[in-house]
Every structure is written in structure tokens, then in C-alpha cells.
């Protein structure tokens, strides 16, 4: 099983869900085919948010969807301009998660 190295960036409040870490370098098992963002979300939920009572502020449906109000960028490009959750990730990609929701 091969591993894909990715850099995750968190800002706009999402870092509070990851122990105030603004970036993480992770290795994701590639299994048998390409890794999509939807696969990455599941990996994050299953491996980085275990026991986090606030995981629902980041993902919904058990890690299958990003929560509304979180902007996702792949190499500084909005995932909506790519293929959204079906965007194929490549070795070394930088995925940024930015909360657009703020109290006031």
C-alpha cells in the first residue's frame, strides 16, 4: 500500500478543531485508486478527529461531507472550480480549509 503526502491548512477558526494547529502534514493510504477530496474528508474524520465532540463543526454525515460554511481550496484554487468533493488529489497537494462563518 502506497502513501500520498498532503499538506492540510486550517484557518478562519477551523484550526480550533485541530488543537490550534494551522497546518498538518499527513500521509494517506492510496489503496487501489486515486484519492478524492471526499476520501480525504473521511480520512480526517476517522484519523484526526477521533473523540472530538466538535467534529460536526467540520464534517457532516460521519465524515462524508464538509460542513456548509467551510471553504475548501486545493493548491489555492476553490474546489468548486475544480470537481468539488470528487476532485482528484495528487502527491504534495495543499488542501486549505477556511471557515467563512463568524459570530458577531
Image (cartoon, helix red, strand yellow):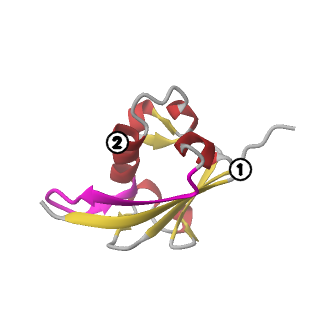
Q: Residue at x 55, y 30 (%)?
A: 54
Q: Earlier in the sequence, mark 2 or mark 1?
A: 2
Rendered position, 57 above or below 40: above
Q: Which residues are magenta?
A: 21-37
Q: Position of residue 81 (x, y in %)?
A: 54, 68
Q: What label does residue 47 carry, if any?
A: 2
Q: Position of residue 5 (x, y in %)?
A: 32, 67
Q: Residue at x 28, y 57 (%)?
A: 28
- Toward the right, the furthest residue is 104
Residue 67 seen? no
Could you say whether the residue bearing mark 1 is in a helix, strand or loop? loop
Q: Residue at x 40, y 40 (%)?
A: 45
Q: Nearer the viewer, residue 19 or 60?
A: 19
Q: Position of residue 35 (x, y in %)?
A: 29, 60
Crowd tier of the residue under label 1, counting other residues whose Cα lies within 10 Å: few below 14, some 14–19, many 20 or above:
few
- Quadrant showing the C terminus: top right
Rendered position, 66 above or below 91: above
Q: Quadrant of residue 6?
A: bottom left
Q: What label does residue 82 carry, if any?
A: none
- Left or right: residue 66 compared with residue 39: right
Q: Which residue is mark 1?
A: 100
**Cα distance in 3D space between marks 2 and 1:** 24 Å
Q: Residue at x 58, y 35 (%)?
A: 57
Q: Position of residue 36 (x, y in %)?
A: 34, 58
Q: Nearer the viewer, residue 80 or 5?
A: 5
Crowd tier of the residue under label 2, counting other residues whose Cα lies within 10 Å: few below 14, some 14–19, many 20 or above:
few
Verify CB contact (< 8 Å) between mark 2 and mark 1.
no
Total count of labels: 2
- Quadrant showing the N terminus: bottom left
Rendered position, 13 above or below 90: above
Amino acid at each position: 500500500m502506497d502513501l500520498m503526502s498532503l499538506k492540510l491548512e486550517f484557518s478562519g477558526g477551523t484550526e480550533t478543531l485541530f488543537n490550534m494547529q494551522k497546518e498538518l502534514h499527513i500521509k494517506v493510504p492510496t489503496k487501489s485508486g486515486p484519492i478524492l477530496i471526499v476520501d480525504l474528508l473521511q480520512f480526517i474524520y476517522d484519523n484526526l478527529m477521533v473523540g472530538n465532540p466538535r467534529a460536526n463543526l467540520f464534517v457532516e454525515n460521519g465524515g462524508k461531507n464538509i460542513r456548509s460554511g467551510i471553504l475548501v481550496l486545493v493548491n489555492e484554487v476553490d474546489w468548486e472550480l475544480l470537481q468539488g468533493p470528487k476532485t482528484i488529489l495528487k502527491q504534495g497537494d495543499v488542501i486549505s480549509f477556511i471557515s467563512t462563518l463568524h459570530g458577531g
